[in-house]
Image (cartoon, rainbow, N blue to C red):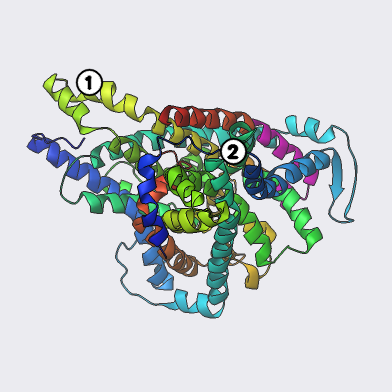
């Protein structure tokens, strides 16, 4: 790439402070509209409108016709034990995943942030789960927890923690534990790298001062480290919380929502009801409710992001 | 904690054990995937499990190549992801430039907020509408359908991260270039583009990482092998007669290689991509 222009105008940076920035207002719109319209069309206005519309109709895949149903879908949904179950299961799984990922991610990141031999290698090995395909992880965890041939059972038996087979995937509670274990396995790495980014931004001098003050390691963590990584930590947790609402691939490959819909998340419910049972009206009404939740949550996340940006500027 | 301090021997030992434990846990499923792809078919699911395979065969790889259309699946995944990343960059970089350099009504709270909010919508909620739209447009079971959808998934991140890259380029450089009689468009191509090239390259990689394993949309929007991606190819190996573990694991290994390379070599940019350019 031709960088001659770049180097020639680098000197201009020095006089930046002298000249007020040129602000041209109109043309900004021209550049931002394509991206904005694209997202608006494909991900917001059209899907939202369509979902709203369909949620008031009943649709038959057989005859490809639909008829007005009023609020029937919403009433049906809110009284449907299946939908309420999927909301409950989704929140339960999300809560435990988030709590465990945060604690593990924080402890591993704190250790990885120290100086020791093999640090770079340890760091690479610990982010490898991010490089795998989620749906295939579902199948691999299926083998690891396979009835009567579970690798995890074997290891736990050798260690003397359990005795005999656990039959993980047949029991509702144990199946949830497996689903949580799978998500924790893949996404703790995400927490690690986000927290490491926060940790690396803390100037060394802070710790030197703490040492001069004879602060204990524990106190240093609470008084210096944690307040400094509060923002990246909160951001990472919120991103994870939102992504957990999308949880689908692993559930599909591992349990198909079973046993007895013990692991059916909201995304899985919408998929099953819309594309397996062809109850489009229910799926649309369910989507609308999820959107409402997401919009409230994303409003919180994004206002945090804006607050952080303003602080940075 | 980069400080130089004397660590006790007990702590050093603890650290080694702690890290080795988690490395072992993190690598177990990955090792199992590699192992399952080459172990003898009769030994895929046995008790006690074989941690090191007693015999190996490459049947899984041969079968996915011959019977499951691996060349199609792989080529589709690559081309869908690359096209989606390019489309997202094409739309996203100008938007990022506008967000960084111009000041206009509704910029932060209106445009940028809405763009970022799409990052959080679960694809499941857009599934029904997209399916019917695609059926009407004839995009069901076409790679373009997925390119369009994936570009939408990438776009919010591209706009936000590229904005943070362009924000780091001093305004004075393009302004003095413009004072020399060049247009803003020329300044964009001669100053902004060369300087943000590393960012664009990194963003391209991150986009590929983000959509590589996407499952739900492609499961619903594609129906035949010539248009499907690797994750769907793997899921279709689960049939009435059982699950073809060897083949699934083989797809998993081959599918993990490119994104693993991306996360190892673009680690620095990963954080930036995950945090929409806020954390560096």
- Residue in the picture at 57% in, 55% down: B185
| Mark 1 residue element | helix
| Closer to us: A193 or B54 | A193
Residue A214's quadrant in the figure?
top left
The residue positioned 74% from the left and 49% from the top of the image is B128
Closer to us: A42 or B88? B88
Give the main secondary structure, helix, strand or loop, of the magenta stretch.
helix
The chain containing the residue under callout 1 comes to A
Q: Quadrant of the C terminus of chain A?
A: top left
User: In the displayed structure, would residue A30 be above or below residue A310?
Assistant: below
- Count of marks placed on residues: 2
Question: Which residue in the structure is indicated by mark 2?
Answer: B112
Location of residue B100 in the rendering, given as x and y in whole percent from the top left corner: 52, 42
Q: Is residue B104 magenta?
A: no
Span of residues in magenta: A271-293
Q: In the image, are marks 2 and 1 on the same chain? A: no
| Disc 1 target residue | A219
């Amino acid at each position: 790439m031709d960088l001659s222009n770049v180097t020639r105008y680098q000197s201009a940076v020095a006089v930046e402070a002298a000249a007020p920035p040129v602000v041209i207002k109109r043309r900004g719109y021209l550049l931002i509209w394509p991206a904005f319209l694209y997202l608006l069309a494909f991900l917001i206005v059209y899907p939202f409108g369509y979902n709203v519309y369909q949620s008031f109709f009943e649709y038959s895949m057989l005859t490809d016709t639909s008829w007005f149903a009023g609020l029937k879908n919403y009433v049906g949904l809110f009284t449907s034990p299946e939908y309420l179950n999927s909301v409950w299961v989704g929140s339960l799984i999300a809560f435990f995943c988030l709590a465990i990922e945060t604690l593990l991610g924080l402890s591993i990141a704190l250790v990885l942030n120290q100086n020791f031999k093999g640090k770079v290698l340890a760091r690479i090995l610990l982010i490898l789960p991010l490089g795998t395909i989620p749906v295939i992880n579902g199948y691999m965890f299926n083998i690891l927890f396979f009835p009567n041939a579970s690798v995890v059972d074997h290891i736990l038996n050798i260690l003397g923690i359990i005795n005999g087979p656990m039959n993980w995937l047949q029991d509702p509670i144990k199946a949830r534990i497996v689903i949580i274990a799978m998500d924790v396995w893949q996404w703790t790495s995400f927490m690690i790298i986000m927290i490491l980014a926060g940790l690396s931004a803390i100037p060394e001098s802070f710790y030197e001062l703490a040492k001069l003050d004879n602060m204990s390691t524990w106190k240093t963590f609470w008084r210096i480290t944690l307040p400094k990584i509060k923002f990246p930590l909160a951001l990472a947790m919120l991103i994870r919380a939102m992504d957990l609402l999308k949880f689908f691939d692993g559930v599909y490959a591992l349990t198909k929502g079973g046993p007895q819909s013990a692991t059916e998340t909201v995304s899985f419910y919408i998929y099953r009801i819309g594309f397996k049972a062809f109850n489009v009206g229910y799926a649309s009404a369910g989507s609308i409710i999820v959107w409402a939740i997401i919009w409230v949550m994303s409003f919180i996340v994004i206002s945090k992001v804006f607050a952080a940006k303003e602080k940075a500027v | 904690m980069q400080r130089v301090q004397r660590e006790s021997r007990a702590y050093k030992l603890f650290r080694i054990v702690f890290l080795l434990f988690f490395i072992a846990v993190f690598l177990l499923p990955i090792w199992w995937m590699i192992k399952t792809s080459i172990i003898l078919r009769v030994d895929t699911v046995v008790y006690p499990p074989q941690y090191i395979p007693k015999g190996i065969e490459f049947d899984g790889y041969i079968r996915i190549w011959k019977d499951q259309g691996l060349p199609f699946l792989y080529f589709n995944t690559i081309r869908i992801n690359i096209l989606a990343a390019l489309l997202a960059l094409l739309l996203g970089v100008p938007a990022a430039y506008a967000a960084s350099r111009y000041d206009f009504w509704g910029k932060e709270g209106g445009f940028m907020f809405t763009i970022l909010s799409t990052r959080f919508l679960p694809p499941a909620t857009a599934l029904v509408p997209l399916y019917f739209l695609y059926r009407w447009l004839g995009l069901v079971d076409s790679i373009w359908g997925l390119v369009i959808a994936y570009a939408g998934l990438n776009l919010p991140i591209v706009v936000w991260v590229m904005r943070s890259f362009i924000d780091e380029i001093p305004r004075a450089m393009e302004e003095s270039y413009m004072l020399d009689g060049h247009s803003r468009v020329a300044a964009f191509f001669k100053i902004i583009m060369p300087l943000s090239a590393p960012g664009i390259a990194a963003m391209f990689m991150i986009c590929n990482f983000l959509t590589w394993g996407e499952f739900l949309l492609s499961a619903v929007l594609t129906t035949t092998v010539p248009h499907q991606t690797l994750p769907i190819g793997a899921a279709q190996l689960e049939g009435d007669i059982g699950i073809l573990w060897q083949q699934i694991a083989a797809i998993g290994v081959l599918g993990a290689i490119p994104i693993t390379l991306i996360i190892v070599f673009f680690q620095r940019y990963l954080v930036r991509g995950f945090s929409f350019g806020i954390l560096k």
